[in-house]
Amino acid sequence: PVLSRVFQELSCGMVAFHSAKKITDIPFPFPYAQTCDVLLILHWLVVPLVTSQWTTNPLWAAVFCFMQVFILWSLNNIAIEIEHPFGSDPNDIDGAGMQNEMNRHLHLLVDQRAQRTPKLSRHFVIDEAEEQR
């Protein structure tokens, strides 16, 4: 039963690995990314005109323009980071570190101390009620 659980966990790990590999192998559609960038630039140019007509105070117009443009460009940059999850950037997933941790856990399974079978002693306690008597 323990060995079948090990193979099951390895199988789940391989499924997750292949799912992650799909993310890196399938590129994001280039026309869609370019269209998003063009629309963001168009939004950046149009928002000051619309906001200046919507508000009477120039300070509020500047605040609303900045908020809208900043939020949308931030979302775009987050999407770009999510598009490439593996690499050497500070926000990327550390594939080498995860592999080293997996190897360390597999090494623990074959360690001599893990191969030892537990044994029961003659003086064991069934439950706390008997222990108190």
Image (cartoon, rainbow, N blue to C red):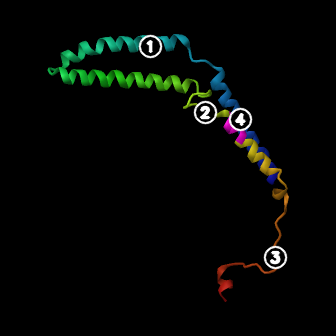
Labels 4 and 3 touching (C-beta < 8 A)? no
Judged from the image, the secondary structure of the residue bearing numbered disc 4 is helix
Q: Which residue is disc 4 drawn over?
A: 15
Judged from the image, the secondary structure of the residue bearing numbered disc 1 is helix
Separation (CA) of disc 4 from disc 3: 42 Å
Image spot of residue 74 (x, y percent): 42, 25
Dot placed on the residue nearer the N-terminal end, 4 or 1: 4
Q: Which mark is residue 79?
A: none
Residue placed at 81% from the left, 57% from the top? 114
Name the amino acid, label 4.
Val
Residue placed at 51% from the left, 22% from the top? 80
Q: Nearer the viewer, mark 4 or mark 3?
A: 3
- Residue 3 drawn in magenta: no
Q: Which residue is disc 3 drawn over?
A: 121
Q: Which mark is residue 93?
A: 2
Image spot of residue 93 (x, y percent): 60, 33
Q: Which residues are magenta?
A: 96-100
Q: Which residue is disc 1 drawn over?
A: 37
Q: Nearer the viewer, mark 2 or mark 4?
A: 2
